[in-house]
Amino acid sequence: MGNCCAYLGPQKNTNVRVSLPAVCFVWQIAMIVLFGVFIRYNPESDAHWVEHMRTENISSDIENDFYYRYPSFQDVHVMIFVGFGFLMTFLKRYSFGGVGFNFLIASFGLQWALLMQGWFHFLDHSTGKIYIGVENLINADFCCAGSLIAYGALLGKVSPVQLMVVTLFGVTLFAVEEYIILHLLHCRDAGGSMVIHAFGGYYGLAISWVLYRPNLHLSKRLNGSVYHSDVFAMIGTLFLWMFWPSFNSAITDHGDGQHRAAINTYLALASTVLTTVAISSMSQKKGKLDMVHIQNATLAGGVAMGTAAEFMISPYGSLIVGFCTGIISTFGYLFVTPFLENKLKLQDTCGVHNLHAVPGMLGGFIGAIVAAAASEEVYSREGLIDVFDFEGKHANRTVGTQGGYQAAGTCVAIAFGLVGGAIVGFILKFPIWGDPADDNCYDDEVYWEVRLAESNFSVEQS
Amino acid sequence: MGNCCAYLGPQKNTNVRVSLPAVCFVWQIAMIVLFGVFIRYNPESDAHWVEHMRTENISSDIENDFYYRYPSFQDVHVMIFVGFGFLMTFLKRYSFGGVGFNFLIASFGLQWALLMQGWFHFLDHSTGKIYIGVENLINADFCCAGSLIAYGALLGKVSPVQLMVVTLFGVTLFAVEEYIILHLLHCRDAGGSMVIHAFGGYYGLAISWVLYRPNLHLSKRLNGSVYHSDVFAMIGTLFLWMFWPSFNSAITDHGDGQHRAAINTYLALASTVLTTVAISSMSQKKGKLDMVHIQNATLAGGVAMGTAAEFMISPYGSLIVGFCTGIISTFGYLFVTPFLENKLKLQDTCGVHNLHAVPGMLGGFIGAIVAAAASEEVYSREGLIDVFDFEGKHANRTVGTQGGYQAAGTCVAIAFGLVGGAIVGFILKFPIWGDPADDNCYDDEVYWEVRLAESNFSVEQS
Amino acid sequence: MGNCCAYLGPQKNTNVRVSLPAVCFVWQIAMIVLFGVFIRYNPESDAHWVEHMRTENISSDIENDFYYRYPSFQDVHVMIFVGFGFLMTFLKRYSFGGVGFNFLIASFGLQWALLMQGWFHFLDHSTGKIYIGVENLINADFCCAGSLIAYGALLGKVSPVQLMVVTLFGVTLFAVEEYIILHLLHCRDAGGSMVIHAFGGYYGLAISWVLYRPNLHLSKRLNGSVYHSDVFAMIGTLFLWMFWPSFNSAITDHGDGQHRAAINTYLALASTVLTTVAISSMSQKKGKLDMVHIQNATLAGGVAMGTAAEFMISPYGSLIVGFCTGIISTFGYLFVTPFLENKLKLQDTCGVHNLHAVPGMLGGFIGAIVAAAASEEVYSREGLIDVFDFEGKHANRTVGTQGGYQAAGTCVAIAFGLVGGAIVGFILKFPIWGDPADDNCYDDEVYWEVRLAESNFSVEQS
């Protein structure tokens, strides 16, 4: 991958004064044009709603879906911007980049996602328009999440222009794999273990593998946290952790579906915290805890419940999922991340392998197993049809078949992540993107005006 | 304005040990008395609700408006206290004052707002009482926002007692201009581009202009951020940005109105982020981004959509609004704020000119244009009546006339801000308020017990 | 309590490498087994919901209680993890422990709470199962709060293993006293002034009293805040303050009950802020404010409204409650905490005496008075029955009697806290728990891998 062998020095050109504004302007103008051509309000957000209510026999404004999706949407929105953003502030001198670039690419990604998902799932072929409402906003936020996960593997090593490219392709690939998994294979994946986490995780890992930096040790002094940056990262961790039940239930069926998905996720996450603490403590001399584990592995239970949350996995089943994924994820941080870096030449800044890729993959297979084990006794006849959407041309599908398709869906997501990420990685290797040199990574001073901080302040004080 | 010409020294008396407790106690007691005389629960929050349900043929407890306003209320509440509060923590040694005084004045302001808005809009003349429910709480939070915006222009230069005065008058002026704009002129202003942002912005600017400090450069060492204070400010930025769709939709009509307002604001804000980044990067050598722009200008799209969010501005229209205001706001931070300070003798700590005053004014005019362009084709006959409330004595108003009134409303808001702010500014010039000397601004040590911080800690550590 | 008299030195063994993982694993496995035996989905979260709807004549999915409790649940969830967690980050070198151990014990506590509260309140004796839904999740979060409050008194002085023990017993005691107070005495306590705050406060104080450390002054250098840790703590303060209306209304009756509880709490908290600022300013030379008061005493109004929030206390009544408790709580921080430490040998790190114990007790008695003063005129006949649940065997209870029972309930909560805390304190004195030595308290380095922070960083920079 990387093929240099000597000191690289600061000779790389990290000036993005042309490329970053150009990308932002051109792509934003493209969004405006495409929205102008394609995007319209759906009946629930259009001023014709009063007429629509009459036609559809809707008796009251409060039956508008806004009231049953919007609180979940806002929780998801917080996860995307504060959750992912602050989780990536843990580096001592890359907090601006962590939260700031996350802000940038999510803002672009959600627009592109409304279009891409719209074309695949919501295009009205009679009018050629995509009609959007609150559910589309949730899906757009979900779609961004794949690229934000990938950012976790690349944190500190890429330029904002590269991140925009990662997001452009990430959202595109997401929409395609989601179409294949949810529509062609007719899988269920409410919280996106497969389509979001497995895909996003492997997408980021593949990019990072292609962009391997043999001399990254030259930036080692900045690849770590300080006391306060670890506390900032806990803001991200906790908002992700707290709102994950909303994430996994945001687009499930109304009624018992949303209710159950929230309960299952809540339980799995609680269980994960205890096993994460246990393994973290066991792994260190004197039993001291490591903030890296607490910030990340505690979330793995939410990832792993992304597919099965809406199923009748039962409360203790959720606890078991959380129990196992907490252990697996923490072991990943302890042993797999160093192994990947040293043996496989894969540098994964945030450990997305342990938090998203593997728990997402597991979540996909857990979903397959739980689906295959479903029965009319547990779900009721109608419940089974509702939960797995055994209607239309899928009316005769058995739960065993469904389980097989769920497993196949997981493989599709991983394949899209790996292949797509490898291709995007090669695109990002062109020397035009303004990425930092190996001795210049993890440093906000490359892309941000940084005030001379504490040291300067102390001087002024004295 | 300031008329001194030599070193001012620390001779100003910043002791607020009598004035601050006196203001807090006396005004709080006044609130209690006035609430005792005027404020009662409305039918939806009164224990007579069961009887009210029967009288009004309400079939179920879940039709209580609490369930359709409260989630939005909580989002707005977070914006007022965490959003505004943390946005103002960016200064290296004024974070306590930023978040703490915001907390104080919002807590007073919302009580006074319940009374002022109650007298103007919700007074039952038969009983002489104001009946409050969750919608009043949202409006009270909105009303505070005007004064909190003004605080942004004054940050670091005034005493908490002065801020209480700013809030007392700010809320009073707000209630009057809101009455004129919403009731007399019958304007629509769901998210308050006019009544909140244009008013609040110009109110703060006028006060700051009157309180001009010619020797403020003596505090220059503290007028800036440090690394961690910029990360704290991003907490404020993101919670404002994420919850702005709730802000603009919190009090719009149930159904499509709230739904559409949320979508429009979500899109405008996403677009703003990209153009803010573009301009910020273009403006700096090597294309580095400036945290001041990311923290502030990214929010301008929400401000500018405050009036038009509930209209059928269409999704691409929202993107265009966000696109333009991101550019305008960032240019404001680059060129207008320095110009105001150097040429117009107007010191605007947080740049409320660029974030609230101008985008608010633009939002008012955008609203006027979109209103004037409304048609039955786009809105449907009933939709038009619903959105613009063309009922009662306004039943015959045309959309063109409505547009004219909207524009007039914007001017009223600005006029109230400028004139009111000038008067309040002169009141604040009396030498009784305990404000800091010119070489003592932006410093928490003036009004807070500050532990000797990092320096002290390092000493102890060694 | 402590009986040593000379320098203790670092001879205590704080290695928790065996005990902490053992406790986490064994207890989590116990949870899984007990959940497997006892916990099932309730009809609203079970896939049989479609059938249940038909049986119960429920016309639509949107009548699922999920939609009317979940937004409040998420607010409460934020209070438990971010609110309590960040409020305890104020110490200069115990932020990891503050937010991290809070995360651990709440995650365990909520699982144990689902079981304990389930056995006492929700056990279906025909099937031997506990059927859970969103309301149980809220109650579980509430139940944890008691133990988290107790942690406030112990912050920095105990090991994570001890905290797990505190939580195990705390949740158990909570479930019993809650059963006595709410079921046997038939008290109303929507926001838990009695069952949560008075109990939790006195529970923590009693434990801390038993664990008195005579040489704690040896850790004095770390028992205080630095500038940024005080700003972190404000995150906790504000999320608690903002979402307290959701806390007090989360499990009240649908309709006017929830609506009124939110309004009353909102008002009481606003009032508290002003009197807290007033007393804080009065107490310091030159009127400077103390962050300790702003972080804590501003919340006392929410605690004190925990019982009466759902009653017709009237808006000005809420303001009066907030007014008084702000004063009392701030005085507590100024005078009572030092008195407790010096005279009663009771070390209360966060001052839970002033924020939870006393305001909780007052809240219980305020509730008793407001209940006793209730009348049919104010509540309506049906309203009175609804609010106080005068049904079944309590149909003939008078409001006077109810007031008496409310007062008795407060005493029960305090007694449980004091006696339970004393017993748990003695258990924690066994020398097996890995707690720190007296000169080693308030220090994250004991239980966390701490990077060498700013000092190290500065060196690298230079």
Image (cartoon, coloured by chain):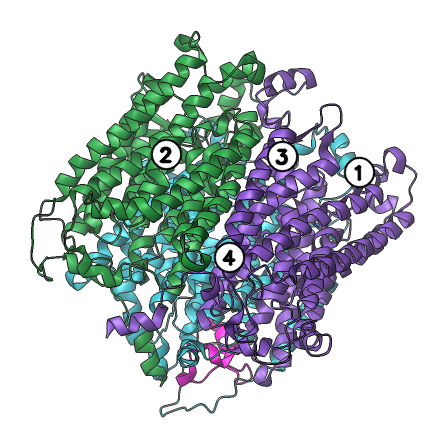
Chain colours: A cyan, B purple, C green
Q: Are marks 3 and 1 on the same chain?
A: yes
Element carrying mark 4: loop
CA distance separating discs 3 and 4:
26 Å
Chain label for disc 2: C
Q: Is residue C384 left or right of residue B392?
A: left
The answer to whether dots 2 and 4 both sit on one chain is no
Observer-side mark, 3 or 4, equals: 4
Viewer-side label of 3, 1: 3
Disc number for residue B34: 3
Q: Nearer the viewer, residue C47 or A368?
A: C47
Residue on which disc 1 sits: B386
Residue C360 shows which numbered tag?
A: 2
Instruction: From the image, tell me which residue sits under label 4.
Output: B16
**Amino acid type shown at disc 3:** Leu
What distance separates the C-alpha of mark 3 from that of mark 1?
35 Å
Image location of residue A377, percent across then percent down: 39, 26
Measured as percent of width and height from the top left, residue B367 is found at 79, 54
B179 w.r.t. C447: above or below: above
Q: Nearer the viewer, mark 4 or mark 1?
A: 4
**Residue positioned 42% across, 68% down in the render:** A153
Chain ID at mark 1: B
- Quarter of the image for residue B433 reads bottom right
Mark 2 vs mark 3, CA separation in Å: 27 Å
The answer to whether B325 is drawn above or below residue C284 in the figure is below
Instruction: Identify residue type, mark 2.
Output: Gly
- Rounded to the nearest angstrom, the CA distance separating label 4 from label 1 is 51 Å
In screen coordinates, is B251 left or right of C123?
Answer: right
User: Disc 2 to disc 4, how far (Cα)?
Assistant: 32 Å
